[in-house]
Image (cartoon, grey):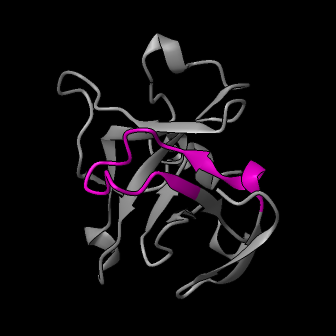
Amino acid sequence: MPKQKQTLIIPRLGTVRLSRRDIFHFPAGLIGFEQLKDYILVGSPDMEPLRWLIAVEDPTVGLPVLLPWYVLPHYELPAAYTDVTTYVPLVVVTLAAEATQITVNLKAPIVLNIRSRQGQQLILPGDRYSATHPLMLSADVASL
């Protein structure tokens, strides 16, 4: 992790200056990227509500993410992760050429602990949520 500000060049997104407090450490990595442990969350007003979770060790690895409530207003996490002053859940978006083919993974949310700067990916039990839920922003969000 950088001790002072460092510059990270992110393909397709540009240059970002970051410091240690910008980084979320994932002790177990993410599914499919277990070797990458440190990530930053990058976004801009023209991309809202989408953000990118970018691997600091390999900035070519970036996952498009958004808050699950943009898709499903009543999305629920396990009780241990419901304190919104501590945890920020994100769901991974699978992009596609056709908008009707874009999906979100509600089954395996990424949870950021904004106090400890730690992150982890959960796999929720049961079949309540899908790993390939069609992306249609909820009417509640669209009206904001």
134 with respect to 55 (left or right): left
* Res. 39 image quadrant: bottom right
**In terms of depth relative to the viewer, which is nearer, 143 or 47?**
47
**In terms of depth relative to the viewer, which is nearer, 143 or 107?**
107
77 with respect to 134 (left or right): right
* Res. 97 image quadrant: bottom left
Q: What span is in magenta?
A: 19-39
Assess whether residue 71 is covered by the magenta stretch. Answer: no
Residue extending farthest to the right is 4
Task: Please name the residue shown 17% across and 27% down the image.
Answer: 127
Task: Please name the residue shown 54% across and 47% down the image.
Answer: 70
Q: Is residue 124 above or below residue 60?
A: above
Give the quadrant of the N terminus: bottom right
**In terms of depth relative to the viewer, which is nearer, 30 or 100?**
30
x and y percent of residue 121 in the render?
39, 38
56 with respect to 71 (left or right): right
x and y percent of residue 54 in the render?
53, 65
x and y percent of residue 100 in the render?
29, 70
Residue extending farthest to the left is 127
46 with respect to 101 (left or right): right
Q: In this view, does 100 lie above or below 144?
A: below
Magenta-highlighted stretch: main secondary structure? loop
Residue extending farthest to the front is 3
Q: Is residue 129 above or below residue 40?
A: above
* Res. 88 image quadrant: top right
